[in-house]
Amino acid sequence: MQPLGLERPVIRIQLESGAGAVGDQEVSAFSAKVAETESGLFVTLGIYSAPAQNFARAHPRIRLIAAPDLVAMILKHYEDLLPKYKTLIPLRRVYVRADAYEGD
């Protein structure tokens, strides 16, 4: 067991709050900080450039999550979140009749 009480697997996480594209240099620099026995999760509120995505595909221990992926995960798992997290992102499900958009 590690000093903080963590057992393997260890996941290193980097968060980027910028709305621009994250390039392969940033992903490569992050990857260099992730040991071979660890996994890396790089989350951005922007997107990843094609070279950054190619780099991550070539390094399976690195996973990229861009803003669209993050939103999709939140929507998919929102009902499973603890109430304290739901208050941070207050959402309400809205139903629309299926035929409301037919013919558009």
Image (spheres, rainbow, N blue to C red):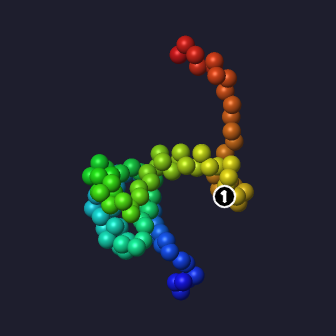
87 or 12: which is nearer to us?
12
Judge by depth and name the residue closer to the eye, 60 or 33: 60
Q: Position of residue 102 (x, y in %)?
A: 58, 16
Q: Is residue 15 above or below residue 50?
A: below
Q: Secondary structure at mark 1?
A: helix
What is the quadrant of residue 81 in the picture? bottom right
Determine the residue positioned at 46% across, 66% down: 13
Q: Residue at x 39, y 49 (%)?
A: 47
In the rendered image, the residue lying farthest to the top is 103
Residue 89 screen position, x and y as percent: 64, 52
The answer to whether residue 67 is above or below residue 26 is above
Along the viewing direction, whichever of 56 and 14 lies nearer the viewer? 56
- Residue at 31%, 68% (x, y): give it: 29
Question: x%, y% of residue 34?
Answer: 38, 71
**Which percent across, then down, holds residue 18?**
41, 56
Q: Is residue 31 left or right of residue 11?
A: left
Does any portion of residue 37 appear in the rendered image? yes
Residue 56, placed above or below residue 29: above
Front-lying residue, 34 or 48 = 34
Q: Quadrant of the N terminus?
A: bottom right
Q: Is residue 90 visible?
A: no
- Judge from the rendering whether residue 78 lies leftward or rightward of residue 83; answer left or right: left
Mark 1 highlights which residue? Answer: 85
